[in-house]
Image (cartoon, helix red, strand yellow):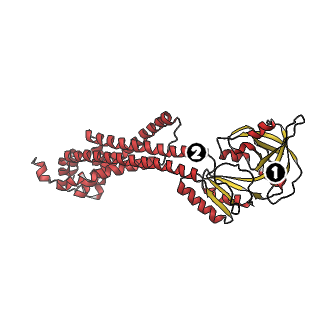
């Protein structure tokens, strides 16, 4: 740097003039490329901090997604029921028999529009009724059974409950096909392809039962809960069969996000559906919120602690760099460079070191996060790419902040005293 400054001075161009801005960057580049262990130590310090931050942030982002998916296995976290249906259940599951109140199916369209901006949200309407079921196989001598009948889209319902087991295929809405619960199938010895008869169907506000119909069993659903005692028909088919066109009993929702996000969605749905009762399932909502909140607090705390330690290390390293280059500073100041210009040179150098350490640290942290995810959680981690600019900027900001403390030494450098060796 001293040689560059001397050659520049021989041309009688003060270092502070704007036409010689390229000289500033030549000095900056030379200060970064000359052999100096302290610069490598600064990069290594930032790299360690950036690697840990990248690892924790990528782990948190992917664990949050994975845990949200795991909590979805427990079913919906919000249910919408008619306001007059005071006895409607407020816990997970599609079961529970007939619901006394009914609401208009147009509520589903409103819910779809409200949750259209929420990726991963699921809306599943259901209509409940009671029927008598018996096997339609000619050789069957088994007595009939009273069952709850649920009208819904079985494919969407299974997506809402991913832990359910299904044998067969989803019923076709254009054909008289049904899905039966595992316990119903066991009692009536039913398998996919058999037929069942439903009659004496009763629904709320209907005293007379429509004539019975025969349905082909398209699949058997095993849930381990009350749904095993139910029969599932396509929603439109049950509405027509029960004489309840355009009516539903309940809407089950799966809304991704933390507890505050779900509460905001609930308030928005309440405002859009004044005739309905919107109830979050507290056990699922707040359990997931507590777990994710604990993980977030742990991630932020560890990242902040490590960054503080790294900041102290970088401050000490940059102080050593500034002290080592007092003669360079004296030469530049003797050639007319102002304190501000010299300070900008050191700050720019620190920013470059921080950016280099941040980018390298992000890649190292991503590799560590992938290794930990596979070893500890046995899952393949998906990179959280928004952490790349965050970690790179944090590394650069950390190095700049650490440089601002020792760079004030520049103001105290007296060229005459330093160059004389005093």
Q: Nearer the viewer, residue 217 or 53?
A: 217
Question: Does the rendering let one see residue 175?
Answer: no
Q: Which mark is residue 69?
A: 2
Indicate left or right for 302 with 138 as reference. Answer: left
Relative image position of residue 410 (x, y in whole percent): 20, 53
Specify few, some or many for label 2: CA neighbours under 10 Å numbering under 14, 14-19, or 20 or more: some
Name the spot of residue 38 as percent of width and height, x first: 26, 41
Residue at the spot x=80%, y=46% of the render?
146
Mark 1 packing: few (<14 Cα in 10 Å), some, or many (20+)?
many
Q: Contact, CB < 8 Å: mark 2 with mark 1? A: no
Label 2 element class: helix
Residue furthest front in the image: 143
Q: Is 131 located above or below residue 103 in the figure?
A: above
Answer with left or right where residue 81 lies relative to residue 246.
Answer: left
Q: Which residue is mark 1?
A: 237
Q: CA distance from mark 2 to mark 1?
A: 31 Å
Residue 104 in picture, x, y percent from top left? 74, 61
Spot occupied by residue 334 in the image (x, y as percentages of width and height): 17, 54
Q: Residue at x 17, y 55 (%)?
A: 412
- Left or right, residue 249 beside residue 410: right
Answer whether residue 368 is visible to the viewer in this image.
yes
Element at badge 1? helix
User: Observer-nearest residue: 266 or 1?
Assistant: 266
- Tally the marks: 2
Please identify the quarter of the rendering in which residue 36 is found. Answer: top left
* Dot 2 or dot 1, earlier in sequence: 2
Question: Which numbered circle lies on residue 157?
Answer: none
Report the quarter where the N terminus lies: top left
- 324 vs 234, nearest the viewer: 234
């Amino acid at each position: 740097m001293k040689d560059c400054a001397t050659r520049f001075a021989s041309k009688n161009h003060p270092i502070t003039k704007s036409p010689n801005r390229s000289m500033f960057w030549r000095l900056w580049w030379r200060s970064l490329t000359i052999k100096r262990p302290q610069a490598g130590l600064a990069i290594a310090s930032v790299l360690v901090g950036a690697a840990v931050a990248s690892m924790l942030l990528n782990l948190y982002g992917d664990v949050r997604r994975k845990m949200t998916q795991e909590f979805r296995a427990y079913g919906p976290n919000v249910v919408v029921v008619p306001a007059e249906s005071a006895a409607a259940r407020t816990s997970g599951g599609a079961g529970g028999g007939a619901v006394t109140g009914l609401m208009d199916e147009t509520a589903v369209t409103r819910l779809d529009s409200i949750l259209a901006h929420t990726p991963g949200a699921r809306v599943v309407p259901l209509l409940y009724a009671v029927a008598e079921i018996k096997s339609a196989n000619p050789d069957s001598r088994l007595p009939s059974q009273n069952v709850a009948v649920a009208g819904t889209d079985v494919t969407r319902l299974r997506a809402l409950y991913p832990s359910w087991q299904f044998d067969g295929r989803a019923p076709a809405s254009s054909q008289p096909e049904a899905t039966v619960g595992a316990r119903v199938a066991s009692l009536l010895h039913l398998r996919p392809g058999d037929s069942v008869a439903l009659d004496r169907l009763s629904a709320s506000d209907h005293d007379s039962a429509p004539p019975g119909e025969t349905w082909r069993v398209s699949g058997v659903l095993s849930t381990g809960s009350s749904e095993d005692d139910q029969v599932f028909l396509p929603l439109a088919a049950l509405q027509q069969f029960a004489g309840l066109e355009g009516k539903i009993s309940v809407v089950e929702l799966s809304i991704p996000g933390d507890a505050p996000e779900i509460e905001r969605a609930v308030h928005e749905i309440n405002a859009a559906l004044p005739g309905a009762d919107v109830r979050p399932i507290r056990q699922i909502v707040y359990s997931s919120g507590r777990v994710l909140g604990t993980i977030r607090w742990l991630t932020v705390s560890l990242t902040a602690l490590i960054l503080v330690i790294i900041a102290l290390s970088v401050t000490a390293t940059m102080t050593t760099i500034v002290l080592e280059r007092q003669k360079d500073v004296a030469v530049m100041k003797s050639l007319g460079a102002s304190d501000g210009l010299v300070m900008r040179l050191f700050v720019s150098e620190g920013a470059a070191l921080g950016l280099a350490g941040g980018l390298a640290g992000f890649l190292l942290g991503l590799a560590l996060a992938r290794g930990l995810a596979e070893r500890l959680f046995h899952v393949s981690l998906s990179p959280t790419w928004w952490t790349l600019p965050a970690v790179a900027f944090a590394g650069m900001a950390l190095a700049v902040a650490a440089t601002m403390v020792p760079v004030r030494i520049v103001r105290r450098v007296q060229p005459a005293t330093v160059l004389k060796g005093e």
